Image: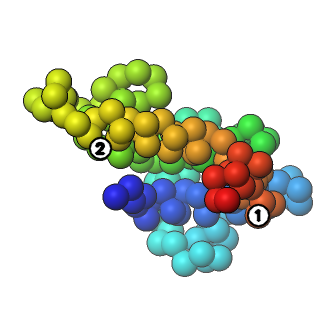
Amino acid sequence: MVLLTRKADYALLAMAYLGHAAGRNGGVCSAREIAARYGIPLSVLMNILKTLQRVGLVTSTRGAHGGYVLARPADSINLADIIGAVEGPVQVTHCSEHPDGLALDSCERSPWCPVRGPAQVVQNKLDQFFRDIRLADVVERSCPSSVAALSS
């Protein structure tokens, strides 16, 4: 089962909040504001925002009117960017290959395993799915046509 951690949930919530805020007040939001809105422990959120800042998804400003803002437009950030920043690559199986072609974990059964090939197909589709959904889609509460096609 593919399961994202609370850390990924919180990162997605924070990024969606910042995406909504992008059109008002310069898009700057405090970590305290985001944490209060979603009931996220402030210390956990601060660590997540630092990680998102380190990978260039958000920027921060100090001061009385400081806070966090998206570093790029919401339509240029996808779910793979956000989840990958806080979780690392999402794996369907231990031997799945990441989109960059590197095996994430070696397995002694790989040469003869009947599941590896089909699992890799699922992995590729999941990776593409996360790349296809933009933060702007989440903010607008709509999905791109490629996602809508998957649900039908």
Q: Nearer the viewer, residue 33 or 124?
A: 124
Tell me what residue is drawn at x 76 percent, y 49 percent: 144
Amino acid found under the numbered disc labelled 1: Arg
In this rendering, position of residue 64 left or right of residue 85:
right
Is 116 rendered above or below residue 24? Answer: above
Tell me what residue is drawn at x 36 percent, y 30 percent: 97
- Give the numbered dot on residue 141: 1
Amino acid found under the numbered disc labelled 2: Thr
Identify the mark nearer the N-term, 1 or 2: 2
Residue 88: percent from left, percent from top: 41, 41
Q: Nearer the viewer, residue 143 or 48?
A: 143
Tell me what residue is drawn at x 57 percent, y 45 percent: 130
On the image, which quarter does residue 36 sit in?
Answer: bottom right
Question: Which residue extends farthest right?
Answer: 24
In this rendering, position of residue 6 left or right of residue 139:
left
| Quadrant of the rendering where the C terminus is positioned | bottom right
Q: Is residue 62 visible?
A: no
Residue position for label 2 = 93
